Image: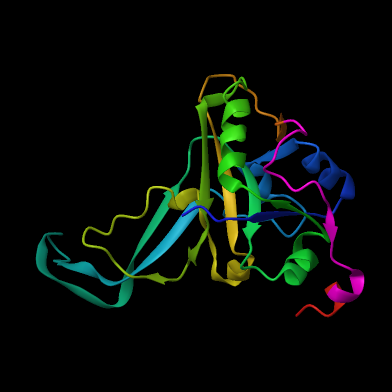
Amino acid sequence: MIPKRLFRFFTDKQHADEFVSGKIRIGKLSVYRHIEDARKDECEGTSYIIWDQFAPECILDKTTGKIIGRGTSPTEKIKSNITLINPIYLLCTISASADKTVAAHKFGKYFVEITDPSGFTDLLKQIWGRTFCSLNGKVELKRVRYTRGNLVKPNRYLIAPGDISYTQKSLKDKEDYEYRFVFWCKIEPNMILDDYQYLDIGSNNDVIKKKIQEIKEQEMKSAP
């Protein structure tokens, strides 16, 4: 389900001004593994699932190496790792469920409201589709799952969600209530991708509120 509103936070007012004017800066996923701010996540692009099911095990004959018995581990759960290979860009936002004061303390005191996330996505698709590295203009809006390294209820075939490698974060970040716009890139030999790109959707749009809001320093100091 697409949320009715989303918010983008900024530490730099100039970046907030650009966003309001329709100049949307997106960052390559790999940037967030090393970025020097609260959005840093060294595990971006890699999922880690611990299924709440004990792992099967085999008993081997020490001499022949043949299987002489089978059973279930009394301690080890089944684990799964998936790594994203495709290059993608991200635009990270938070939903209205997040505490804005806490978000400001973490991501910056300036924020802009995306009043129509669905319409915003459509505009981004149009512009992204004209970008040299775009994969057929593919843009997705995804809700982040806060399940990395935690027990996950197993499904019948232990198949992880197809988007888990680029939508999973640690449980410690769950109060972010993050939604991310995902911009897919085609794969071509020798194609060089900048860390950031700007997509200009124009200032004459009705999907972004034309006002930069600010959380005051005193409010940020009182945030937990």
In the visual, does 128 lie left or right of 47?
A: right
| Residue located at (51% from left, 26% from top) | 135
Residue found at the very far right of the displayed protein: 217
The answer to which of 2 and 178 lies nearer the viewer is 2
Q: Is residue 161 left or right of residue 195?
A: left
Q: Quadrant of the C terminus?
A: bottom right
Residue 165 point in image, percent of width and height: 47, 50
Residue 9, position in %: x, y? 75, 55
Q: Reply above or below: 44 against 134.
A: below
Q: State the extent of the magenta-drawn residues as a range.
A: 202-219
Q: Is residue 71 left or right of residue 159?
A: left
* Closer to the camera in the image, 22 or 197: 22
Q: Is residue 216 magenta?
A: yes
Which residue is found at the position 22% from the left and 58% from the top? 157
Q: Which color scheme did the rendering employ for the protein? A: rainbow
Whether 97 is among the magenta residues is no
- In depth, the one of 206 and 84 nearer the eye is 206
Q: Quadrant of residue 78?
A: bottom left
Residue drawn 37% across the image and 58% down it: 80
Q: Position of residue 179 (x, y in %)?
A: 58, 54
